[in-house]
Image (tube, rainbow, N blue to C red):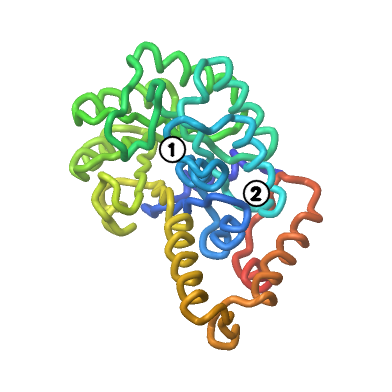
Amino acid sequence: MRTPGSRLRHAVADAVRHGRTMPFLGVYDVFSASLAARHSEALFMSGFGFAASHYGLPDVGFISWTDMLDFVGRVRSVLPSHHLLVDIDDGYCDIEVACHVASRLERIGASGVVLEDQKRPRRCGHFDGKQIMELDEFLPKLTRVLETRGDLFVVARTDATDPAEAARRVRAFADAGADAVLIDGVRDLGLLRGLAAELEPPLAFNQIAGGKSPRCGLTELGAAGVTLVIYSTPCLFAAQRAIESALGTLIAADGRLPAPSGGEVGVADCTAVLQANAARRDVRDIVPVAIDPVAISASA
């Protein structure tokens, strides 16, 4: 039976072969992952989203690897068949820790990781003030992670803002054996088109509402040579808006809850999601089987 990493590797290769793009929906907790799983077989464990939900803090380096490991394990336990791509920032500092985290994540069922070349203090790739490691300092970390993993899919990310430097770095990542490469905060799709024609590893593209990169559809990104499209925060931002709206309406209505029959979520709707998770938790083997989107929709 295929491992999560080999399943993702096969899916990406198939997407490249047929010229398709794969959307990875960013989630911030197990419940958001449960809902996103209805819409895509590929999920992204967002560092921005996790920092916000778990700590209530911005994405500037507060995440500990043990907390992220626990998060991924809880999501995998209820979603045994999905691709889980995990943001591990800079590998949580040094080379030994990065290798340990990658190995532990692979053992609990992560499909892949995104490893960046920022140095501390790090921050979200769409924030200003990023600092990047020297290339000859980052490459040994990337190489060791690649040597340590088994089937884990590794996306090597650069936060370089100069297009020429970013291109130089992803070429080096490709030569090192990265499974995919990502320039975060890229502003010009022309740069990606040129690299897609040149590099063997597929290109990834990270989208965040209000971020530095242009708003693009999957068709447009596919035409630019992008295979993996990461959506970092759609669930988090949607939750923020919905919570503010719902609670504002509740107060304005003198504390009267809306009727679920009017299209609002009620206890039965929420419980259906949780019961579907409980049913999937009964699967003890975390190595996934082929995903059946129809069965997922029916079970929810």
Side of 138 relative to 213 (left or right): right
Q: Is residue 254 above or below residue 171?
A: below
Q: Is residue 291 above or below residue 182?
A: below
Towards the viewer: 120 or 102: 120
Quarter of the image with the N terminus is top right
| Snapshot quadrant of residue 187 | top left
Q: What residue appears at the point 77 percent right and 62 percent down from the top-left corner? A: 279
Quarter of the image with the C terminus is bottom right
Q: Amino acid at mark 1?
A: Asp
Q: Position of residue 231 (x, y in %)?
A: 41, 51
Towards the viewer: 227 or 93: 93
Q: What residue appears at the point 49 percent right and 65 percent down from the top-left corner? A: 243
Q: Which residue does the numbered mark 1 point to in the structure image? A: 59
Q: Amino acid at mark 2?
A: Val
Residue density around tag 1, few if under 14, some if 14–19, many if 20 or more, within 10 Å = many
Side of 125 relative to 73 (left or right): left
The numbered disc on residue 75 is: 2
Q: What residue appears at the point 28 percent right and 29 percent down from the top-left corner? A: 129
- Of the numbered discs 2 and 1, the one sitting upstream in the chain is 1
For the residue labelled by badge 2, is the local secondary structure a helix, a strand or a loop? helix
For the residue labelled by badge 1, is the local secondary structure a helix, a strand or a loop? loop
Q: Position of residue 27 (x, y in %)?
A: 52, 52
Q: Is residue 65 above or below residue 192?
A: above
